[in-house]
Amino acid sequence: MREKLMDYQNETDNIYNLEATPGEGAAFRLAKTDKEKFPE
């Protein structure tokens, strides 16, 4: 995502900010933990 954002910034000559909400970070972290505990 970061690379695509930087490409878009270069195309448009505008500056954008990429942010993740706490819920998205928690969902990723919990999914990763589940995969480690339950690999099947």
Image: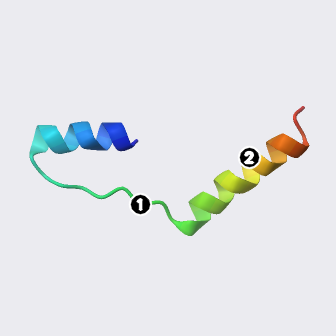
Q: Which mark is residue 28?
A: none
In the shown orientation, is residue 19 left or right of residue 34?
left
Which residue: 32% across, 37% down? 4
Secondary structure beneath label 1: loop
**CA separation in Å, label 2 and label 1:** 20 Å
List the residue tagged with mark 2.
32
Which residue: 65% across, 52% down? 28
Q: Position of residue 27 (x, y in %)?
A: 67, 57
Which residue: 83% across, 48% down? 34
Q: Earlier in the sequence, mark 2 or mark 1?
A: 1
In the shown orientation, is residue 39 left or right of residue 16?
right
Q: Residue 18: which quarter of the image?
A: bottom left
Where is the C terminus found, in terms of image quarters? top right
Q: Position of residue 6 (x, y in %)?
A: 26, 42
Residue sitting farthest toward the bottom: 22
Q: Amino acid at mark 1?
A: Glu
Q: Position of residue 20 (x, y in %)?
A: 48, 60
Crowding near pointer 1: few (<14 within 10 Å), some, many (20+)? few
Residue sitting farthest toward the top: 40
Which residue: 13% across, 52% down? 14
Count the marks: 2
In the shown orientation, is residue 25 left or right of residue 32?
left
Residue sitting farthest toward the left: 13
Q: Position of residue 21 (x, y in %)?
A: 51, 65
Q: State if disc 1 and disc 2 touch (CB < 8 Å).
A: no
List the residue tagged with mark 1.
19
In the shown orientation, is residue 3 left or right of residue 29?
left
Crowding near pointer 2: few (<14 within 10 Å), some, many (20+)? few
Q: Amino acid at mark 2?
A: Lys
Secondary structure beneath label 2: helix
